[in-house]
Image (cartoon, grey):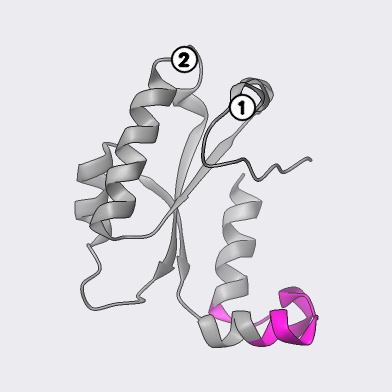
């Protein structure tokens, strides 16, 4: 499997990569501006044949603020289900990153790692 982290600008090469992809993972947070951007990106992708069915939305940093929009409301806003939810656990993530130890080794039993494992296995 190959994973590409594409630019935010969606250049021609980005669209070429997405056209060849089996799955397109659109990562967002559950706040108004992020969800507004998801809607814009989805409108753009829906204009291209075959893209809409490939897109999976992943909510990142779930539970990071009290002002966060509920998953149900987010799904209503974007018009599709949220494929996966990755909890906010910045302490574990930063400790892993700062120590240079991959999350799988640093905190394999953490909710953060387990959620990532679950959603990648679902792909």
Q: Is residue 95 above or below residue 104?
A: below
Neighbor class of circle 2 (other Cα within 10 Å; few <14, some 14-19, many 20+) is few
Residue 32 vs residue 110: left or right? left
**Residue 105 shown in magenta:** yes
**Residue 86 shown in magenta:** no
Q: Which residues are magenta?
A: 95-111
Neighbor class of circle 1 (other Cα within 10 Å; few <14, some 14-19, many 20+) is many
- Nearest to the observer: residue 120 or residue 18: 18
Tell me where residue 8 appears, x and y as whole percent. Answer: 52, 42
Q: Residue at x 79, y 80 (%)?
A: 105
Residue carrying label 1: 18
Residue 3 vs residue 42: left or right? right
C-beta proximity under 8 Å, tags 1 and 2? yes
Quadrant into which the C terminus falls:
top right
Q: Earlier in the sequence, mark 1 or mark 2?
A: 1
Q: Is residue 113 above or below residue 12?
A: below
Task: Judge whether residue 107 can be spotted in this image.
Answer: no
| Element assignment for label 1 | helix
Task: Judge whether residue 102 can be spotted in this image.
Answer: yes
Residue carrying label 2: 48
Residue 122 vs residue 107: left or right? left
Quadrant into which the N terminus falls:
top right
Q: Is residue 44 above or below residue 7?
A: above
Residue at the limit of the structure toward the top, as seen here: 49
Q: Residue at x 22, y 54 (%)?
A: 72
Tell me where residue 74 appears, x and y as whole percent. Answer: 25, 51
Would you identify the image quadrant in which residue 115 lies?
bottom right
> What's the distance in space between the residues labelled 1 and 2, CA to CA?
10 Å
Would you identify the image quadrant in which residue 85 lies?
bottom left
Tell me where residue 35 appears, x and y as whole percent. Answer: 30, 49
| Element assignment for label 2 | loop
Tell me where residue 101 appears, x and y as whole percent. Answer: 80, 81
């Amino acid at each position: 499997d190959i994973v590409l982290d594409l630019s935010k600008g969606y250049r021609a090469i980005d669209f070429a990569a997405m056209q060849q992809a089996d799955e397109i993972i659109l990562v967002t947070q559950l706040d108004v501006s992020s969800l507004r951007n998801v809607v814009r990106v989805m409108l753009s992708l829906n204009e291209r044949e075959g893209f809409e069915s490939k897109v999976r939305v992943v909510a990142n940093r779930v539970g990071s603020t009290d002002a966060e929009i509920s998953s149900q409301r987010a799904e209503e806003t974007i018009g599709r289900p949220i494929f996966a939810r990755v909890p906010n656990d910045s302490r574990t993530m930063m400790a892993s990153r700062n120590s240079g130890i991959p999350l799988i080794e640093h905190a394999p039993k953490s909710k953060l790692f387990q959620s990532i494992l679950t959603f990648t296995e679902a792909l």
